[in-house]
Amino acid sequence: MDRVLEPTPKWFRIVRNLGLALSAVGGVLVAAPVALPAAVVSVGGYLLLSGTIIGAVSQTAISQEEYGDRNWKSRENSSENSPGESGNQP
């Protein structure tokens, strides 16, 4: 959950917004009040699905520098808190 709440890099914000736009267009095509050809409704479903996936994946992206810092900190904490390990081992 922490990763989703972190700030998203600029490129992935653009991709996320593109995914939201695709989802909106797909939703309109699927839920249109008029009778549309089956092919158009099918394309709308695919747009809805792909836009949702693109938006979800791009929201979880964080910058490489920040991920590297977090990963390094988690390694330090896990090695400090590990029982039975001593710092005198070669």
Image (cartoon, helix red, strand yellow):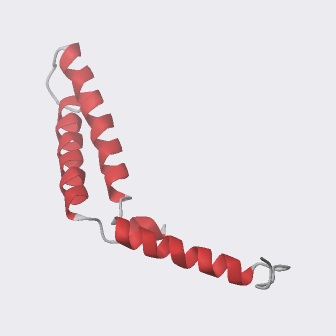
Q: Position of residue 29 (x, y in %)?
A: 18, 30
Q: Quick check: 76 left or right of 27?
A: right
> Which sits in the foreground, 19 or 60?
60
Q: Position of residue 33 (x, y in %)?
A: 16, 30
> Which sits in the foreground, 6 or 68?
68
Image quarter in which the C terminus is found:
bottom right
Q: Is residue 63 above or below residue 26?
A: below
Q: Is residue 2 above or below residue 51?
A: below
- Residue at image coords 17%, 14%: 37
Q: Quick check: 69 left or right of 14?
A: right
Q: Position of residue 21 (x, y in %)?
A: 17, 46
Q: Quadrant of residue 73?
A: bottom right
- Residue at image coords 32%, 53%: 58
Q: Is residue 22 above or below residue 1?
A: above
> Which sits in the foreground, 59 or 77?
77
Q: Quick check: 53 left or right of 44?
A: right
Q: Quick check: 37 left or right of 55?
A: left
Q: Is residue 26 above or below residue 75?
A: above
- Residue at image coords 73%, 82%: 81
